[in-house]
Image (cartoon, rainbow, N blue to C red):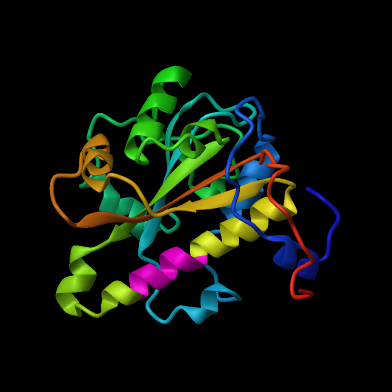
């Protein structure tokens, strides 16, 4: 990570337009970033009134010590159990070696790097940011149970997804990296990739993290001083 105050990280937070396709993310940084997305009774998660309903599906391209592939961070034991009955039964669902046990990080399936990049790029509307980043992810929401109980809960699911995104933005900046939220993606192919047969889970928002490539043609001014 980098030595900056919280205020500095918040004020410099930006979305990356391009990523360095050669950069490898240190494994410890990857674990720390994922740990920051786990729910707790403290800020910022105490702002959510509806509990935890989103798991993370990760396309890991270049993380130290991890083979390229599709990974799952259920975020709670309840969601991990629920996903058992919904995801492709051929997935490995094996705990990731060297990952802190409390993370609950699972390898779904390894994949050749070039093939994984092709699939990630294709699912994310053919955007290079999904294949050139260190990893991309989809936020898989527990959908039917919430919507059937209360159609307005769709807003709560989006708030949870947005909060996860903001945590990822700030954690990436604190690690000397950068994030980009992705709202353009093909949800049906993404669901097919996971073996989902119905709408019990739906992907609501996507995100990607990597080392940004700065465009010198873009002018930057000090925040709030214009």
Residue at x 28% of width, y 41% of height: 190
Residue 70, image x, y percentages: 41, 33
Q: Which residues are magenta?
A: 156-163
Tell me: residue 32, above or below residue 121: below
Towards the viewer: 35 or 135: 135
Report if residue 36 is visible in the image: no
Report if residue 159 is visible in the image: yes
Residue at x 82% of width, y 50% of height: 2
Towards the viewer: 178 or 41: 178
Residue 4, image x, y percentages: 84, 59
* Image quadrant where residue 159 sits: bottom left
Magenta segment, principal secondary structure?
A: helix
* Image quadrant where residue 194 sits: top left
Residue at x 62% of width, y 26% of height: 65
Side of 104 where 224 appears, left or right:
right
* Image quadrant where residue 213 sits: top right
Side of 197 where 31 appears, left or right:
right
Tell me: residue 57, above or below residue 220: above
Residue 178, image x, y percentages: 64, 48
Side of 165 where 222 appears, left or right:
right
Tell me: residue 203, above or below residue 66: below
* Label tally: 0
Residue 51, image x, y percentages: 40, 74
């Amino acid at each position: 990570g980098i030595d900056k105050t919280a205020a500095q990280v918040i004020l410099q937070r930006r979305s990356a337009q391009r990523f360095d396709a050669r950069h490898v993310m240190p494994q410890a940084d990857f674990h720390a970033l994922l740990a920051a997305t786990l729910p707790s009774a403290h800020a910022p998660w105490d702002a959510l009134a509806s509990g935890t309903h989103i798991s993370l599906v990760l396309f890991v391209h270049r993380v130290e010590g991890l083979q390229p592939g599709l990974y799952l961070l259920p975020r709670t034991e309840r969601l991990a159990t629920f996903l058992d009955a919904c995801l492709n039964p051929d997935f490995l669902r094996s705990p990731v070696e060297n990952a802190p046990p409390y993370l609950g990080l699972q390898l779904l399936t390894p994949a050749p790097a070039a093939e994984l990049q092709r699939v990630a790029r294709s699912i994310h509307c053919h955007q290079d940011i999904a294949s050139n980043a260190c990893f991309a992810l989809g936020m898989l929401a527990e959908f039917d149970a919430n919507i059937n109980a209360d159609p307005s809960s769709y807003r709560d699911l989006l708030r949870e997804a947005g909060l996860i995104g903001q945590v990822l933005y700030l954690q990436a900046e604190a690690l000397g990296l950068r994030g980009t939220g992705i709202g353009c993606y093909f949800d049906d192919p993404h669901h097919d990739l996971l073996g989902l047969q119905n709408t019990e889970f739906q992907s609501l928002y996507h995100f990607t993290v990597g080392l940004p490539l700065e465009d010198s043609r873009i002018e930057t001014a000090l925040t709030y001083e214009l």
